[in-house]
Amino acid sequence: MAGHNYTHDHEEVEIAPPQTKAIWRTFYILGGITAFEFLIAFTLHASILKTSIFIGLTIVKAFYIVGEFMHLKHEVKSLIWAVLLPCMFVVWLLVALLIEGESIFMIR
């Protein structure tokens, strides 16, 4: 390798500033929803309302996490619907199976 002169041209690359404000905002929003879930867990007795609130808040947190950390909220609407529509059908299927699955015990 004697006689070869390896030189690399490095361009000045501007590094984007850290997005700490967005990260802390996301932390506070998810922390607030989780704190609200804990408040409900320790104040309400077991009921359909309590379960519904937990399921609803879990779905809200899941959509927020997907939107923020997987950057889905910055995509085009058709891609968002291509992800959300199958998820909604899966949730509908699970609810239908739970409701109909319970009815088999009523037959016997």
Image (cartoon, rainbow, N blue to C red):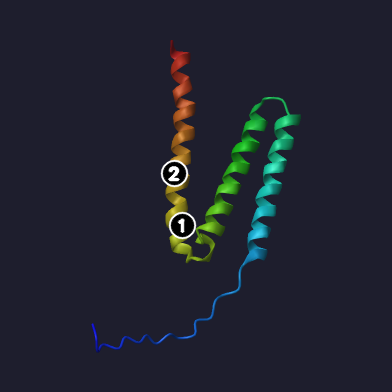
In the picture shown, does residue 107 fall above or below 44? Answer: above
Q: How many marks?
A: 2
Q: At label 1, which amino acid type do we have?
A: Trp
- CA distance for labels 1 and 2: 12 Å
Q: Is residue 23 left or right of residue 82?
A: right
Residue at point 59% right, 38% down? 55
Residue under pointer 2 = 89
In the picture shown, does residue 97 fall above or below 19? Answer: above
Along the line of sight, the residue nearer the viewer: 84 or 24: 24
Residue under pointer 1 = 81
Q: Position of residue 78 (x, y in %)?
A: 44, 62
Q: Is residue 75 left or right of residue 29?
A: left
Q: Position of residue 99 (x, y in %)?
A: 49, 27
Q: Is residue 34 left or right of residue 91?
A: right
In the picture shown, does residue 56 fall above or below 41? Answer: below
In the picture shown, does residue 19 fall above or below 1? Answer: above
Residue at point 65% right, 50% down? 30
Residue at point 72% right, 35% down? 40
Q: Which quadrant is home to the C terminus?
A: top left
Name of the residue lying farthest toward the top: 108
Q: Which quadrant is home to the N terminus?
A: bottom left
**SS at circle 2:** helix
Q: At label 2, which amino acid type do we have?
A: Phe
